[in-house]
Amino acid sequence: MSTGILLSVVIPFYNEREVLPECLKRVAAVLAGLDGKTEILFVDDGSRDGGGDFLLTQHLSGIDLRLIRLSRNFGKEAAMTAGIEHARGDALVILDADLQDPPELMPDMIARWRQGCDVVLMKRRSRAGESAFKRLSAHVFYRLLKRACGFHVPEDVGDFRLLSRKAVDSLKSLGESNRYMKGLFAWVGLPVAVILYDRAPRHAGCSKWNYLSLMRLAWDGVTSFTTLPLRLSMLAGVVAALLGSLFGAWIVGKAIVFGDPVQGYPSLMAIITFLGGVQLMALGIVGEYVGKTYMESKRRPVYVIDFQTRTCDGEVWGQ
C-alpha cells in the first residue's frame, strides 16, 4: 500500500475470549508488514466472557486499535454493520475472530484491490473442522439462493472479504434494518475478484452458531431478497385447487354412474387436511413478509453502541 492509504480490519466477535489474544497477534503481525496506515476495529456484540475487557488492556505500536462495544447481543449482521459504518479505511477487510479465515491472506487481497477491484471475495475451497451435513447444507443453500435472487450471489463465500471505500459507502447508503449481509454485499455489485483458500478449523473455543440459528439466518436471506416463497405458496394453492377440482369431478362422475351411498369420510378429511395445510403454509409465508415490513416501518437502529475506545501507541481515547 502507498503511505497515504488507510486499511481497516473489522473483526466482530461474541464470547470469543479464548481466541482473541491469538487473533490480535496474527492480525497485528500481518499489518506490521504492510506499508501505510492501518487500524483494527473490534466490534464486541454484547460478549459476557470478558473479551472486550481484554482488548481494553492491549496496545499496539503503530497500529490504531479500536473497540466498539454494543449495548447487547444484536447478532453478527448488526455487529458487521457497526464495523462497516465506523471503519475509516480506504479499504476494509472483514475477518472472523475465530481464525478459520487466515489473516495472512490479507496482502493478496490488498494486491487484487490495488489492481482495481472494489470487492475481493474469499471463496472456500475446503472447510476443515465442519461436519459433512453442514458442508452439504451450505452447498445446497448457496445454490438455491443464487437461483432465487434476481442477482448473482457468490457460492461458498462467507463474510471474509475486502471492500473498497466505494463499496463501503454503497453499503452504508442502504437503510434497511433486517440485514442479510451476504446478500447486501452481492446486491451492491461493483468489480469483483475471487481468491480461493482453504478454511481452517477454529483456533479455540466453540462455534456460537447452531443448526437452528443457521436455518433462521438462511430463511432471513431468502425472504430478504426474493418473493419466491410467496410465488411458491401461490403455486401450491393452484395445484391444490386443481387436484381438488379433479377429485370433485371424479366423485360426481362416480355418483352419477354407480350411485354413492353415504361414504367418503376418509377422503373428505384428507382433502380438508391437505387444503388446510396449504392455506396455513401460505398464510405463514405472507405473515413473514408482513412482519418484515412492520419491523422496517419502525425505523429502529440496527444496533446501539454502549461505548467505543481508540488506542494508538499507548494513548487511549474513549467515549
Image: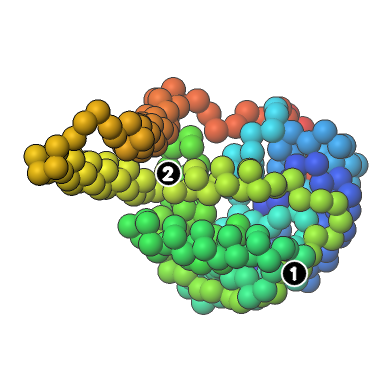
Could you tell me which secondary element the residue under label 1 belongs to?
loop
Q: Nearer the viewer, residue 107 or 215?
A: 215
Q: Which residue is mark 2?
A: 224
Instruction: Name the foreground residue: 126 vs 135.
Output: 135
Q: Residues within 10 Å of mark 1 (few under 14, many from 20)?
A: few
Is 227 left or right of 1, judged from the image as shown?
Answer: left
Q: Please report whichever mark, 1 or 2, sits nearer to the chain's N-terminal start.
A: 1
The quarter of the image holding the N terminus is: bottom right
Q: Provide the secondary structure element on which disc 2 rests.
A: helix
Image side of residue 277 versus residue 23, left or right: left
Taking the view exactly as shown, the residue that stands out farthest to the top is 298
Which x, y percent locates residue 131?
Answer: 72, 63
Q: Position of residue 171 (x, y in %)?
A: 47, 49
Residue found 47% across the figure and 53% down from its top: 183
User: From the image, which quarter does the C terminus lie in?
Assistant: top right
Q: Residue furthest left?
A: 256
User: Residue 109: in sight, yes or no?
Assistant: no
Q: What amino acid is at disc 1? A: Ala
Q: Which residue is mark 1?
A: 128
Q: Position of residue 222 (x, y in %)?
A: 44, 48
**Label number found at residue 152:** none
At x 70%, y 47%, the residue is 209
Instruction: Give the CA distance from mark 1 to mark 2.
Output: 29 Å
- Does residue 277 appear anywhere in the picture? yes
Q: Nearer the viewer, residue 310 or 257?
A: 257
- Residue found 89% across the figure and 49% down from its top: 18
Identity, as a three-letter code, of the amino acid under mark 2? Ser
